Image (tube, rainbow, N blue to C red):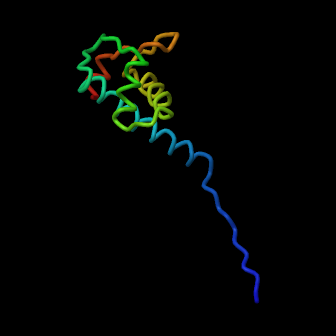
Amino acid sequence: MGIICATLAFPPRSTFAMTDSAQAEETALAILDVVVNHFMLKPGDVQITPVFLRVWEGKGQDEELFEPGLNYAAQQGWVEIAADGGTFTLTQSGFDVA
C-alpha cells in the first residue's frame, strides 16, 4: 500500500483581500438597495443603524457582513457614518448608485 502525499496550495493573500473587497462591495450595494427601496431615503436622509439592522436581518442578510459593507459604502462616498456609528446618512452619490 502506497502513501499518498498531497500539497495544499493556498491562493496569495491578495486573492483573499480581493474576495473580501468584492463581498464588501456587494453588501454595500445591498445596503443602498434597502435604504432607498425599503426605507425610501433620499440624499441627506439619516438612517438609524439599529433600526436598519432589524430590517437587514429580516431580509435574511448576515449582520456580520453589514459593517464591512457599510464601511465600503463610506469609502466610496455613498454614505457618511456618524462618529458613534449609531446612524449613517445617504449621499447623492449613494442614491444615484442605488
Query: On screen, 81 above or below 34?
Result: above
Query: On screen, 56 above or below 89?
Result: below
Q: Nearer the viewer, residue 67 or 96?
A: 67
Residue 48 in percent (x, y) is at: 39, 14
Q: Quadrant of the C terminus?
A: top left
Residue 87 in percent (x, y) is at: 42, 13
Residue 39 in percent (x, y) is at: 27, 21
Q: How many marks?
A: 0
The residue shown at (48%, 34%) is 65
Quadrant housing residue 45: top left
Residue 30 in percent (x, y) is at: 34, 33
Q: Nearer the viewer, residue 95 or 63?
A: 63
The residue shown at (36%, 15%) is 47
Q: Is residue 16 left or right of residue 47?
A: right
Query: On screen, 3 above or below 77?
Result: below
The residue shown at (30%, 23%) is 35
Q: Quadrant of the N terminus?
A: bottom right
Considering every residue shown, the one lying at the far bottom of the view is 1
